Structure formats: structure tokens, C-alpha cells
Amino acid sequence: MDLTSLDRIRAAHDRTELALGPRSAPLAGGTWLFSEPQPGLEELVDLTTLGWPSVEQTADGLTLAATCTIRSLADLPPVPGWRSQHLVQQCARSLVASEKIWDWATVGGNICVALPAGALTTLAVALDATALVWTPDGGERREPVASLVTGVRTTSVGPGEVLRSVELSAEVLAQPVAFRRIALTRHGRSGAIVVGRRDDAGGLVVTLTAGVTHPHRLAFPTLPTPDELAAAVDAVEDWYDDPHGSPDWRRAMTLRLAEQVREELA
């Protein structure tokens, strides 16, 4: 879609060129920005010209640049020690996007748009990812992706701030996961997603997305009983309501998927 309110698209080549005004927005893949009118924007600042490496591996884990595309992440060769790497494909396919979208949509864009069915939000929260955010004063701050996404189309990223990368620890990458998803139609938008992860202490971390307005992370120090898990899910109150599923249906399906995940990881 043509964005008729734009005056310019500016390429940033270093951090000093990242200054964002009140009517500016960062541009990575642009798959959402160019999908609908953006009447409040006059300028886009291209982040792809900064040359951030898509994926960096260290002894501490993986760093995914905000500009890393879904394609780059999905096609990543097997990473030694990453026991849950299959989760990338599972989350990416839950996006129900075309091959063209995979080529352009980015990790940072998917998280910052903050849609309930955000596939990379699911991946990041399920793996306890930490967001590195550049602040307009030249500093930086870190925040769990689980709290970065605060609601439907809302995040804690403030004016002038830019999501630089998402960090995954080697410890979490080595832990087993289980994934479940459901939609009202075979190729429809995700109605509910549940990801479970067994930690090194024998506990269970359950991530709920798609069926709620923001990600929920339910952590148990030991494997919960079916009743304990159901009680934790029942305590959730912000079930999402749109044409892809009613709140009651999303709650019921999340309860079912959560128990399936618990059984698989038991």
C-alpha cells in the first residue's frame, strides 16, 4: 500500500542517525507498515542499512537482531546445544504467512507490532528472551520480552526507543519444549497457542499467546498436577475476542492444549 502521508524514507547508517521524531517510525521489513494506512507518519527510518548481523552465537547463547528476517531464522543450520530449535519452524508456521512475508518480516517488527498471534513473540517469550532496547539518550536497557508486549498493539518501547536485538541464553536453549496451536479453520489465524518448557530444576514454564491480549508466562517450580495447571490458566482474565475466536472458546482450547503440553513434557 502506498503511504501517501510520508515525506521521506531515511536510511540510518549508524546510531547517531536513528533519531526518531513524533511522526517518525523505524522501518525493518515493512510488512505491517505497508499493509494499511499510516496517516500519522511523515518519515520512516530504515534500520536495515545499519548492517546488524542477523544471528550471533556466543558461549552465552544467541542474539537475534531486530532486523533478522523470519526466513533467516527458520533456515538457520542446526545450532549445537539448541534442543528447542524446532520451535522456530512451529512458531513461524503459526503466522500463516506467505513465503514472501517470511523473506521480509523481521523478528523485531513481529514483536513490536504486538499482535496477539505474533509468532516471534511466542518464540521469544517461550524461550525467556530478553529484549535489548536502545534509548534516545544513547543508552540502552534490557527487559524480558514477556513484559515488553503489554497488550494488543501496545508495548513498553517508549518514544524514540528502538528494539536492537533479542537475546536467548544457552541454558534455556538446551531445555526441551512442546508446542500446541489451534485455529478455527485449517489455515486460519491462531486462536490459541501454548508452549511448555521443562527447566533444569524439573519445573515447567508454560507460555500462553494468541488467545490472550498479551503473553502470559506461568512458571511452576515442579511439574504441576492437571488441577494446578488448570487453576493457573483459569486465573487468566484477558481472553481475546475477535472473529478468530470467542473468549470462552479460547479459554477452553488453552486449557486443553496446556494439559497436552504438560503430559508431553512429564
Image: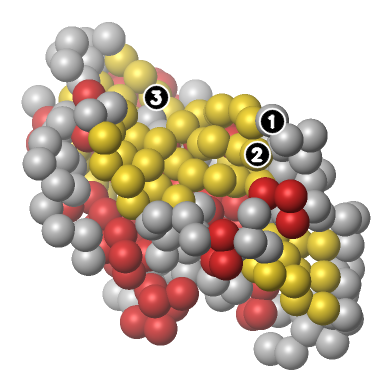
Residue at left offset 11%, top offset 53%: 78
Q: Is residue 186 above or below residue 136?
A: below
Neighbor class of circle 3 (other Cα within 10 Å; few <14, some 14-19, many 20+) is: some
Left or right: residue 120 compared with residue 91: right
Find numbered disc 3 in the image and state the secondary structure of the residue it sits on. Answer: strand
The image quarter containing residue 133 is top right
Q: Tell which circle, 1 or 2, labels the residue nearer the N-terminal end.
A: 2
Q: Position of residue 57 (x, y in %)?
A: 27, 41
Q: Quadrant of the N terminus?
A: bottom right
Packing grade of label 2 (10 A; few <14, some 14-19, many >=20) is: many
Residue 112 vertical placement versus 124 (above, below): below
Looking at the rendered image, the disc whose residue lies closer to the viewer, 3 or 2, is 2
- CA gap, disc 3 and disc 2: 28 Å
Numbered mark located on residue 134 in the image: 2
* Residue 213 seen: no
Do tag 3 and tag 1 residues touch (Cβ < 8 Å)? no
How far is mark 3 from mark 1, CA to CA? 31 Å
Image point (49%, 44%), residue name: 165
Of marks 3 and 1, the one in the foreground: 1
Q: Nearer the viewer, residue 131 or 54?
A: 54
Instruction: Identify the mark nearer the N-term, 3 or 2.
Output: 2
User: Helix or strand or loop: what does disc 2 sit on?
Assistant: strand
> Tags 3 and 2 in contact by the CB under 8 Å rule?
no
Residues at marks 1 and 2, CA–CA distance in whole angstroms: 6 Å
- Frontmost residue, 120 versus 170: 170
Kind of residue at disc 3: Leu
Q: Is residue 248 left or right of residue 19?
A: left
Find disc 3 in the rendering and name its residue.
218
Mark 1, residue position: 139
Q: Secondary structure at mark 1?
A: loop
